[in-house]
Image (spheres, helix red, strand yellow):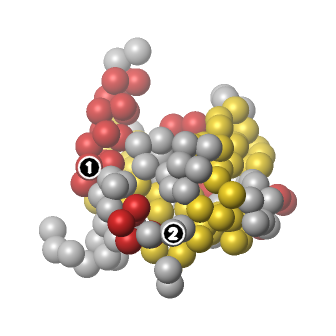
Amino acid sequence: MGNNPNDIIKVTVDKFIFTFPVGLRYSDSGLWIRLEEGLARVGLSDFAQQRNGDIAFANLPDMGSLVDAGDEIASIETVKVNISLPSPLKGRIVETNSALEDSPELINQDPYGSGWMVVLEVEGLEQEIGKLLDADAYARIAQQQADAELKL
């Protein structure tokens, strides 16, 4: 596969198909990170949203909030579970997706587009983003987790 940032890796497990855009970075907790003009846009990966079910609520932090890597950056509630999502990076929240207040299902419908959650301003972003997983590495983790869950 080439280095086209629009390339997508697809993983099929049983009847599920998970997609992972190559141009993004990923945290092992299921968040994607897209570099945009020196900022980091963050959302929930296709695998993570499918795995957790239909999202009923998305709770986002206040703009201006400071988060450390590992601190809660958002939480989601589904019919199955309530999940606290750890921030993949240390930074300041400069934008939140207010559309999720009324339409949290956007995360399920368009996880890499209109379902984004927050935008972070990160010091040393280029260095920090390099510590995250690329699409190949995250797709392998997702495949292993999905296979393990099928065996339960």
In this figure, which residue is indicated by the disc labeled 1? 137
User: How far across and down, in percent of the image, does residue 31 sit?
Assistant: 50, 52
Tag 2 secondary structure:
loop
Question: For this rendering, which residue is in front, 31 or 149?
Answer: 31
Q: In the orientation shown, which residue stands out farthest toward the bottom?
A: 37
In this figure, which residue is indicated by the disc labeled 2? 123
User: How far across and down, in percent of the image, does residue 19 sit?
Assistant: 38, 56
- What residue sits 67% from the left and 29% below the top? 81
Q: Residues within 10 Å of mark 2 (few under 14, many from 20)?
A: some
Callout 1 amino acid: Ala
| In this rendering, position of residue 88 left or right of residue 96 | left
Whether residue 95 is situated above or below residue 20 in the rendered picture: below
Q: Residue 127 carries which label?
A: none
- What residue sits 34% from the left and 55% below the top? 131
- What residue sits 29% from the left and 33% below the top? 144
- Position of the C terminus, as image quadrant, is top left
Can residue 42 be seen from the camera position used here? yes
Can residue 115 be seen from the camera position used here? no
Tag 1 secondary structure:
helix
User: How far across and down, in percent of the image, does residue 11 sit?
Assistant: 30, 48
Q: In the orientation shown, which residue stands out farthest toward the front?
A: 123
Q: Give the mark nearest the N terminus, 1 or 2.
A: 2
The quadrant where residue 132 appears: bottom left
Whether residue 33 is situated above or below residue 45 in the rendered picture: below
Callout 2 amino acid: Glu
- Position of the N terminus, as image quadrant, is bottom left
The quadrant where residue 98 appears: bottom right
User: How far across and down, in percent of the image, does residue 8 sit?
Assistant: 32, 65
| In this rendering, position of residue 41 left or right of residue 9 | right
Q: In the orientation shown, which residue stands out farthest toward the top?
A: 152
Question: For this rendering, which residue is in front, 84 or 112?
Answer: 84
Question: For this rendering, which residue is in front, 74 or 6?
Answer: 74
